[in-house]
């Protein structure tokens, strides 16, 4: 039993590396572990007129204990097919939770697990992905959208602010949907950043029906209608 637990802990360590590098935009500093790519005080992005801070570009500045303080609500999930680059690449499943335990703040928690066929059995690994101040008439759903949108801009675009100058590394000519299995909320965010194919206009309208208003312009700009 002890050997099995040790193996799972080692495999979980690999997941931690993949999560930090592939999704959280952190860098490995010898002797210190993973640290943010940048450590600015200003928010990473202003999303829907609200500041959003990101673990890869901002220093974590909230008093928070995941083991005792957490109050989680499931927000979404997605599969990352290239979470650990290699030959072959290893994918991983990712769950997203909005934590409502901190006064004045929402926190987006990421829980990841690499595919067992490649990485072996492991424990899930968690990380704070982003955080945002609560607003009047706010909700967990709204806050989740702006935190995940900022987080995926960080993962796919980096620090470029002008939306006219960027393109996602993962759009796969619009055919990403099948390999990036994801919940509806995550789809709305991914499809606002990546070229995305739809069968027709009716398919597009039905897929984005529940998307927040601030994403609609981006979803329209990235849509590809299949005429064949």
Image (tube, grey):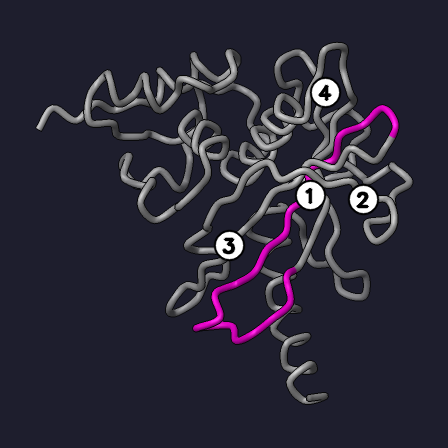
Alpha carbon distance from label 3 to label 1: 14 Å
Alpha carbon distance from label 3 to label 4: 28 Å
Residue drawn at 43 percent across, 12 percent down: 217
Alpha carbon distance from label 3 to label 2: 21 Å
Q: Earlier in the sequence, mark 3 or mark 4?
A: 4
Residue 121 drawn at (x, y percent): 56, 74
Residue drawn at 85 percent across, 24 percent down: 104
Would you say residue 58 sits in the magenta stretch? Answer: no
202 vs 25, nearest the viewer: 202
In the rendered image, which residue does mark 1 sit on? 109
Vertical comparison of 8 with 212: above or below: below
Q: Quadrant of the N terminus?
A: bottom right
Q: Is residue 84 left or right of residue 227?
A: right
Residue drawn at 86 percent across, 44 percent down: 69
Q: Give the SS element for disc 3.
A: strand
Alpha carbon distance from label 1 to label 4: 17 Å
Alpha carbon distance from label 2 to label 1: 10 Å
Q: Earlier in the sequence, mark 1 or mark 4?
A: 4
In the rendered image, which residue does mark 4 sit on? 51
In the rendered image, which residue does mark 2 sit on? 70
In the rendered image, which residue does mark 3 sit on? 93
Residue 155 drawn at (x, y percent): 55, 40
- Is the residue under label 1 in contact with that under label 2 (CB below 8 Å)? yes
Extent of the magenta region: 103-124
């Amino acid at each position: 039993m002890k050997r099995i637990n040790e193996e799972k802990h080692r495999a979980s360590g690999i997941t931690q590396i993949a999560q930090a590098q592939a999704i959280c935009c952190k860098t490995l500093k010898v002797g210190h572990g993973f640290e943010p790519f940048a450590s600015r005080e200003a928010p990473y992005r202003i999303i829907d007129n609200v500041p959003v801070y990101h673990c890869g570009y901002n220093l974590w500045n909230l008093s928070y204990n995941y083991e005792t303080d957490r109050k989680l609500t499931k927000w979404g999930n997605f599969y990352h097919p290239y979470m650990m680059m290699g030959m072959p690449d290893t994918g991983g499943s990712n769950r997203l939770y909005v934590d409502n335990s901190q006064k004045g703040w929402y926190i987006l928690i990421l829980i990841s697990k690499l595919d067992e066929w490649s990485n072996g059995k492991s424990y899930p690994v968690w990380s704070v992905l982003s955080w945002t101040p609560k607003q009047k008439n706010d909700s967990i759903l709204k806050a989740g959208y702006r935190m995940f949108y900022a987080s995926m801009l960080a993962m796919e675009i980096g620090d470029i602010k002008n939306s006219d100058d960027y393109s996602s590394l993962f759009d796969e000519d619009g055919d990403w949907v099948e390999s990036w299995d994801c919940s509806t909320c995550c789809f709305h965010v991914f499809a606002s950043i990546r070229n995305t194919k739809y069968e027709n206009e009716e398919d597009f309208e039905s897929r984005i029906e529940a998307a927040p208003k601030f994403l609609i312009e981006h979803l329209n700009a990235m849509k590809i209608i299949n005429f064949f």
